[in-house]
Amino acid sequence: MINNYIRKDLKDFTPYHAQIKDYDIKIDANENPYEHNKEIIIKVNRWLEDCNNIRRYPDTDCTDLRNAIAKYWNVERDNVVCGVGSDQLIDSILKVFLEPGDKVLMPTPSFSMYKLSTKLNRGIPIEFSLEDDFSYNVEKIISLYRKEKPKCLFICTPNNPTGNTISIENMEKLLEEIECPVVIDEAYSEFIDESMIDKTYKYNNIIVLKTFSKAYGLAGLRVGYGIASKDMIDAINIVIPPYHLNSLSQFIAKTVIENTNEYNNKIEEINSNREWLFNNLKSINYVEKVYPSQANFLLIKVSSYTIAKKLENEKILVRGYGDAGELANCIRITIGTKEENEKLIDVMKGLI
Ligand code: PMP
């Protein structure tokens, strides 16, 4: 009965659920494997002791957090918007710019939320394939842009799940030809230490999305942010709900961005662990390809998609992509600690 009342275009949708699985090693969601520094935990405990901090509604404008982000990136507070994860910002951007039936250009394979959020906001996803090595073909995107006249374009760099980037030079070539809002998703850019944020002064139609979920290990707190021209930020704020980001998340994210030095060593360690894993995965006989990555994960192609399930049976959770589509027989592995990576290689060598 209630089904008769669901929006027609959502009738075939199923709710998003993530199964809770038992594990020893969790390398399926690109999270940070390291613990937070003690000083940060002490600050959080102190913050929790003041009851007012949780009795009161949060600061709806996330003023302190936005100030800290603005200071870190050398922009103004008005150039920053915070979200409940960058997921919320992806949704908000589409919510404010799309009329029903508008097209949105996005790469494939890439982060699945662009497509889902577009549909939930009554838009039409138009996917452009990446090249065989997963690189972005700028000319191809420009000609598709001219043909389809989309309301919004998504670029993910480094791209999830392929790990490759688009260079700043190519990004600018693209931007010179694009008028519509362009979302540059830099969820993993801390691992390359390269960003388009300083170009937000030059192109007022771009928004750079960042997250505390990956390099900064706060996935459980759901904090993302966007940096853009003031006009772009003002537009997005129209659809951000009041009190969206809870006080604890605001406080911890602020503390973390004020102490990024504490995280830089870990980021370097993850990068060197990735190189170790890259070389060792290549030596496993059923691993057909390891794609070069500049993020905290590696995409590999194996002889059978069942490897993901076999690893799960060994209590190692990875992200498998099944046996069909452009990522058939591919597995995405988050870079873990040295011990986790060594265990993974050991277990993988014993499988077939
Ligand atoms: N963008 C990309 C490319 C991602 O991989 C993810 C998380 N998997 C997100 C955005 C969303 O991150 P958040 O936790 O900030 O919502």
Image (spheres, rainbow, N blue to C red):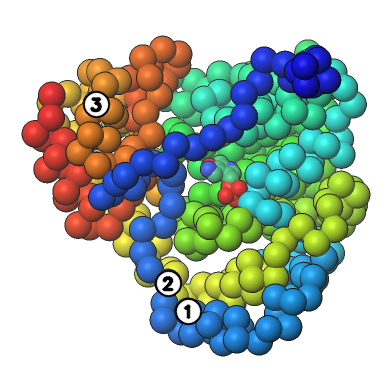
Give the image quarter of residue 123.
top right
Which residue is label 3 attached to? 307
Measured along the vertical axis of the image, is residue 62 above or below residue 239?
Answer: below
Q: From this viewpoint, is residue 104 visible? A: no
Dot 1 or dot 2, earlier in sequence:
2
- What secondary structure is found at the residue carrying circle 3? helix
Label 1 CA crowd tier, 10 Å (few <14, some 14–19, many 20+): some
Q: From this viewpoint, is residue 39 visible? A: yes
Mark 2 C-beta closer than 8 Å to ligand 1: no
Cα–Cα gap, marks 2 and 3: 32 Å
- Amino acid under disc 1: Ile
Q: Which label sits on residue 36? A: 2
Q: Are marks 1 and 2 in contact (CB under 8 Å)?
A: yes
Q: Which label sits on residue 61? A: none
Label 3 CA crowd tier, 10 Å (few <14, some 14–19, many 20+): many
Residue at x 73%, y 83% (from the top left corner): 52
Residue at x 60%, y 81% (from the top left corner): 48
Residue at x 83%, y 20% (from the top left corner): 5
Residue 78 shown left or right of residue 125 in the figure: right
Name the residue nearer the viewer: 172 or 287: 287
Q: Position of residue 229 (x, y in %)?
A: 83, 54
Residue 115 shown left or right of residue 148 in the figure: left
Give the image quarter of residue 255.
bottom right
Which residue is label 1 attached to? 41
- Amino acid under disc 3: Ile
Q: Position of residue 247 (x, y in %)?
A: 70, 70
Residue at x 24%, y 42% (from the top left corner): 315
**Ligand 1 rendered quadrant:** top right
